[in-house]
Image (tube, rainbow, N blue to C red):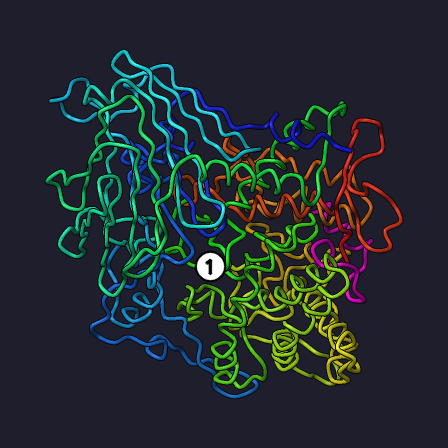
Amino acid sequence: MIDREAVVRRHNVELVRADAAAAITVGNGDFAFTADITGMQTFPAFHDQAAAHPEKRLAVNTATMSTWGWHSMPNPEGFVLADAMTGYQTARGPVEYPDRFDMMAMFTGEIAEEYRAGTWLHCNPQRLDLGRIGLVLRPDPDAAAESDPGALTNPRQRLDLWSGELVSVFEYAGHEVRVSTVADPRDSRVAFRIESELLAAGRAAVVLRFPYASDDFFRTSDWSAPDRHTTALHLLGDQSCRLDRTLDDTAYTLRLDWSEGRISPTGEPHEFVLTASSAALELVAGFAPGDSWAHERAEFAPVRSAAADSWRRFWTSGAAIDVAGSTDPRAAELERRVVLSQYLTAVNCSGTVPPQETGLVTNSWQGKFHLEMHWWHAAHFAVWGRPDLLERSLDWYLSILDSARATAQRQSYAGARWPKQVGPDGRESPSEIGALLIWQQPHLLYLLELLHRSRTGPERERLVARFAELVEETALFMASFVEDRSGTYHLPAPLVPAQEFYDARTTEDPTFELAYWWWGLEIAQRWRERLGLGRNAQWQQIQDGMAPPRQETGVYSAIATEPYLRRDDHPSMLCALGVVPVTPLVDAATMETTLLAVRDTWQWDSAWGWDFPVMAMTATRIGRPDLAVDALLMDRPKNRYLPTGHCPQMGSFLPIYLPANGGLLAAVSLMVAGWEGAGTDLPGFPRDGSWTIRHEGFIAWP
């Protein structure tokens, strides 16, 4: 048995200085609170991504976010998706795709008339920053509030991963301040205990600030529009209040309960201060959609206890890995990344809807989900023995099934075509890339297959019945998408492959997507058999006749049309054997040659965080564990993990990138547990004695 508590706690996050990139989040998958060095949101300007990005500094917003908190800007011109369509000629005749959007124009503000509708539709809805809860610190009661975290001395901050409690200690104006921060494991609540003589002296208090929504790329809030929203304070006795928030058509509520003191407006718009008369203050902030809050009074201690129990159950369930005793100098760093990635994906990627690439920490693409990234965020939950954390987000696909069917029908396809970039309503966002991307289509099938492998008995039967319609509709689209050319089935233009920088109007037969199409249809066939039905003859004909991937001099190309291969961005052809299991379309020896060519010639500074796990998975499947470890831990700018466990990609543009964390966990599980029929343990680690690995609870991959 692995001493799981020892493994987890040796990677607790500890910070000893204020760092704009080092924000720490507590949360539960559907709600999260991201704190600065004070354990609260005391210095928001210090963490402002929008200000840091032009200066090429790395910063992470300290926001409060949820899966249910969304807002849309007014739409007086009534833009609809049809206003952003462009016609494409296809073998099925003219087809319209919503591609009228210019991303660079969105940043410059110079939006051409033809892109106005697409820009509004792309930027709406946006995820809300529900509000900031911070300390106000003053050197004396009448002085201005402190705005510089540099004024704090001897800061020490520790995230106890085993209990989920964030403890922050620092000194200010000659006095120590101690803050404990925990998130409720079930509800949208965060709780604090603050201890300092500064409270009773009137030199420390709690301040609540509420912004308007922002439709910028990565801003979570707009503090310059106080007249566009309202905040109404309602006292519920001496130690509780309700704050009703209204932003256009969006309404939500914050209920605040505290141990002693009083709350009052500060005189600034949408700003309230909670003062105390003793040296200790406890408070619980609970958020909810709509205009009411039904929960009874909440207190710090029960929330803290519930959080500790929940995290203990998390760490003692599912899989675990212990690399103590390894002599490879990279072993401890790999274990650190593994432990922190489990925490971060549980907090940010285990909710009731698919996650955004920056989770519940900060916005990217206005907070929308990228469904082609859903696999990278969440596939690992199933193979790490935590299937419930994956299944929670799959029900959402049922809610948008009619919309996905309508998209397929509009494009003269059968079944359901899943969008790329969406908010909770499932309406796709105009984009010349997203509207034509296809590799998200088999994702749902693969996620369900992994979920099926992690279930047993009646749970498996329930799963098969519950998602049978999604499987069938997804496969119907995939079968109707291919083009029959003399008995060979192709993936035809227009399409955008996973390596997105090819011309959609001419690109055909991308290597990864060809293999993925075969595998997706195979999953759908297996699902039919589980339902007591026969294999679909048309799907089988397509599988048997899928076009082989293009290769040149024994190396797979990315696509089958010119320019065949660019050596930047994602080396997506590697996914065809690694992410995807063995199929009749891909030769292992050719893939090994391809992997070596990618390793030696790729522009690695242009790669993304999940590309390194891709290489590791491919190397593992082809029997090159030496290459697997090297790939997973390659020292490149987008494969570096901060002390918080985050993996920044493009400075403050994408200061965190959770597909990297999820991809790491997927790769490690394959390297440890292998796949069905692999015939060996730890197939992704060298057998030269440099790695000593104990593991338990993993589920083998297909």
Residue 189 can be seen, yes or no: yes
Residue drawn at x 87%, y 45% is 680
Determine the residue located farthest toward the bottom in the rendered image: 93
Position of 164 with respect to 256 (left or right) is right
Of residues 549 and 337, which is closer to you in this image? 337
Residue drawn at x 75%, y 71% is 522
Residue drawn at x 30%, y 37% is 258
| 695 w.r.t. 492: above or below | above
Residue 173 is one of the magenta-drawn residues: no
Give the quarter of the figure containing the N terminus. Answer: top right
Of residues 257 and 349, which is closer to you in this image? 257
Determine the residue located farthest toward the top in the rendered image: 174
| 45 w.r.t. 593: above or below | above
Position of 48 with respect to 17 (left or right) is left
**Residue 458 picture location, percent across and down:** 74, 66
The three-letter code of the residue at mark 1 reads Phe
Residue drawn at x 40%, y 78% is 86
Magenta residues, start to end:
576-597
- Disc 1 marks which residue? 369
**Residue 93 picture location, percent across and down:** 51, 88
